[in-house]
Image (tube, rainbow, N blue to C red):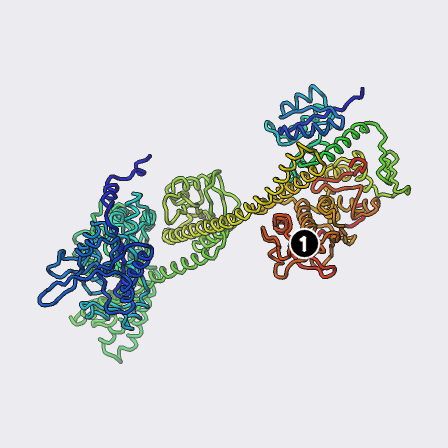
Amino acid sequence: MTQNDRPSPEALLRAAAQEGRGRLKVFLGAAPGVGKTWEMLTEGHQRSDAGVDVVVGVVETHGRRETEALVQGHEVIPRRDIDHKGHSLGEMDIDAILARAPALVLVDELAHTNAPGSRHPKRYQDVEELLDAGIDVYSTINIQHVESLNDVVASFTRVRVRETVPDSILEQAEIEVVDIPPDELIERLKDGKVYIPHEATRALGHFFSKSNLTALRELALRRAAQAVDAQMLEHVRANALAGNFAAGERIVVAISEYPHAAGLVRAGKRMADALKAQWTVVHIETQRDQHFSEGERRQLADTLALASRLGASTASIPGSSVVDGLCSFAGDARATQIIIGKSNRSWWFEKRHGSVVDRLIRTIGDVAIHVLPSGGGDPATAQRHEPSRGHWGRPSDYIWSLLMVAGITVIGRLLIEAIALGNIALLFLIPVMFAAATFGLRAGLFAGLVASLAYNFFFLPPTGTLTVNNPENVISILVLLGVAIVTSQFAARVRAQADLAGASARQNAALASFSRQLTAAPTRDELMQAICAEVARLLDVRAVLLLPSANGPDLRAAYPPEDKLDQIEMAAAQWVIDNEQPAGRGSATLTASDWLFHPLGSSFSSGRGVLGVLGIARSDARDPLRSDQVPLLMSLLDQASIAFDRMALEEENMRARQIDERDRLRSALLSSVSHDLRTPLTTIITAAQEMKRHPSAVLADAIETEAQRLNRFVANLLDMARVEAGALPLKVEATDLFDAVAGAVHDTRASLQDHGVNIDIVPDIPLVRVDPVLLHHCLINLLDNAGRYADAGTPILIRCRRLSDALALSVIDQGPGIPPGQEKRVFETFTRLEGSDRVRHGTGLGLAIVKGFAEAMGLTVEAGNNDDPFGACFTIRIPEALIVPHLDGKEVL
Amino acid sequence: MKIRHKVLIVDDEPHIRRLIQTALTRADYATLEAENARQALERLRQERPEIVLLDLGLPDRDGLELVPIIKQNADTTLIIISARDATEEKVAALDLGADDYLTKPFDTAELLARVRVALRNRMTRDGGVPAIEVGDLSINLLERKITKAGKEVHLTPKEYAVLAQLAKYPGRVITHDQIMLQVWPNESERHVEYLRVLVRTLRQKLESDPQRPRFISNDVGIGYRLRLPEYE
């Protein structure tokens, strides 16, 4: 026995405390009006009908007739009147209930506050006492009265209730959620069917909004789920599995490209485990992302992958700034906790730009923010990006700026007589703004500088020099430069956001189409092929998919088609399977491979290991993946994993259905077997015993006949087992129907001794490609069947006809025929037609075997009635494709 | 004293051995028994039986392995006894040198017929004049002459080759491959289709009612045999 198998002492103690104590069942509702009281009373009646002694302790009917009618049926313990400031308040009479000592008492409104002067200030305390006395209690409560959720509810409904019930009461209770959809509840409210407590009437409109009701309903359902979880844990003390989320907290971990982000993710995991919360790891894409180096991108992708492995959902969200993006994401995700790393930026940088953390705290509302130290990872040790070309732009940008300024200079010179000098300065704004908006800050500044130089040189007196006489003109130059700076800043920001949004939209579109393709794949093989094709298309690579097997990785799909991989590729793929880490070119391991392999893990359980390995490579032997494609690949892998899981689930379902079907067959088989085996066995045993005393030929005949019957039955059972097992091994060869018919007639001569057999086959009937053994069994069963149903003495006809697109081989008897509408059913297992007054021997397996064998060979069977002579007609159709073309006699002979 | 032919029964089921033994003793054969491969080979060496009835499902060794060993080490006629569905197993055993087969469950009349056929084939095997009379059909392999109801039947060379294969061991099954090997020495020409067509034309020439062949019978999935009505 392992440690985990042993019940914990605490659990045993709690169980002991429960012994002899009453059980509490709570009907939990999302809001007033869902019908808790009604549900409680109804169930009370059921218990009462089942013989349980049920009384009503207290029920608030709020004057509703249906509820009152339900109370009528119960014994009601009269309330005790308590005088309070001149009002007489009726409270539950706990002493009367204890004296009455019922098995079950119904107590409405668990959260009720008793009138001053009562024994307990709260009704749930009364209930505790009843439970202690060994009385079972049914009670009701709305979700907003649950203590731990009180704040949460108040935060979005803006209605705070003062009457709360501690969670510990609910934890020992069985919880039943009384649930109706929000729309229906609103409808009931409009119809006046909902009693609104006085304190809620003020905020009525707001409280019963659809969004609130939806949120409340979710809370109620999750609280119930939590209770089930807790109770299950109490019983089995199982380890918490990933995905075992309880209701309530949602944690958002914000990460950057810095290496310490992994530490944040782990901290998030710890907190999520402790709070049993859902958690999301998010990266906010800002302009900075565009300038990330390879290393930084990879770092980010690794961190997000780590988060996925630890069970977080991950997201990458574009935003104008980290704070804005994070705030909006936290709002959407209804985050209750945010984890963020302490910035490693210099004091000076933070003074100038403001710390992200400070701004976040100021901006975000009711969310706890955890700021964690950055730890060992220093952004300086991460590869800093060298200023990329993006900052300085292309040389042509500067040439264009220069040309524009030159153009304006020429125009200005032409217009100098016509317009004032100051307005010419305005003309120079045009190239500056254009350059700044189009080519970015540096080109804009360059244009501004050149423009001010040109203005100074060509227009400001003294012209031809770079001296400025009038201080006013200094302002003109400064304005030109300022405009360049401001314009370029704005334009750059807009452009960067547009680029980001564009990239993100492209990526989303790619993912959506990927997901569509995967969903459409009906089988595992097609799914794998779709994954390869889509990955190849989206990343512009070659893709292969391998599955782990006992003999190493098994190449199952590839795009473009690939037969096999080299030794080193196989080794890399195996390494991926063993270590659940990427390997191959561009990774940290086995880099000599041309391929990069990534594991496809199960998305909802980590224990199942690697489901598959996706390999990618470029035909030109470059690194398979650009760094900016890493996040896309990660997302694709995630989706592929989900699709794999989905497939696995579907296969499991399918298996379950097949098992069901098999069980059905098995029980049918069992009943058939017990009858069809026992009957002949009984005859044989009795006859053999009798023969010991008086040897007789009649008895020997009986034994032989019955033994033959058994033999045929066992043969059919074996055949049926082969059909059921599916995938009959076929040995197809050219077969002569003359042979087949003659063989079948020969083998059934015993059972057809009462019938003549007429064979009507055209002499030049072509050969057919079938499995002769299976066809033989088909014919034997058809003849057997005909022999059983045909009227005694009538002949059985075997007819073969050439149709336009097939050969039809029919067995026709002269019996009662097949009842109309039963033509398909006769081929089902264990169908025996008993429409007529005669019940025939046999198991009802024969025709099912005919159908199973025929279909395995690509033939079809049909049943019908023949008109002249009347009787059943079973036809095997051999399609054109299986007919051997006429052979040239000379060549053969 | 008449010399009785010795038949070795190899089967691990004592009941089956006893039944076969009873039937054979009544038909005046001397019987030997073996319940596994080891015993079977021992008896074979010591007693030199003319006929071995071998069940393929033996506890100590795959029966198929025994087939060539028995055929190489003893001058005996080997009849395989095997289950109904084991078509491929039967073909393999026949191609490995077994002389005939019986399908379980069999009746004793059939068993005795097979044993008689086997003994007859043994006696006519070497040098005997292979001339067969089956009903109104007579086949003289020496003169290559076939007559049906006294009238000569003309066969094409390939038809004759097929018939000759069957007539060499009348009553015994000859697998498709064994026939084709002789009729089409060139492997690329060997097609079951051709064999089927030849058998059909042969029946049209030899049989009174080709739809109910009496002489050339088909063992489904295994081969053809020339039926000897006097043994059935």
Q: Nearer the viewer, residue A182 or A542?
A: A182
Rendered position, A722 above or below B66: below
Expressed as whole percent of the image width and height from the top left, the position of residue B189 reads 74, 43
Expressed as whole percent of the image width and height from the top left, the position of residue A811 reads 71, 53
Q: Nearer the viewer, residue A492 or A136?
A: A136
Would you name the residue on which mark 1 appears? A876
Rendered position, A60 above or below B110: below
Q: Nearer the viewer, residue A775 or A630?
A: A775
Disc 1, SS? strand
Identity, as a three-letter code, of the amino acid under mark 1:
Ile
Q: Quadrant of residue B22?
A: top right
Image side of residue A402 versus residue A462, left or right = right
Residue that sits furthest to the front in the current view: A693
Expressed as whole percent of the image width and height from the top left, the position of residue A178 reads 30, 60
**Quadrant of the drawing holding the N terminus of chain B:** top right
Expressed as whole percent of the image width and height from the top left, the position of residue B64 reads 64, 31
**Quadrant of the drawing holding the C terminus of chain B:** top right
Q: Quadrant of residue A860?
A: bottom right
Q: Quadrant of residue B17?
A: top right
Label 1 marks a residue whose chain is A
Q: Residue at image x 20%, y 47%? A: A373
Rendered position, A527 above or below A205: above
Q: Is residue A354 visible?
A: no
Q: Residue at image x 25%, y 75%? A: A424
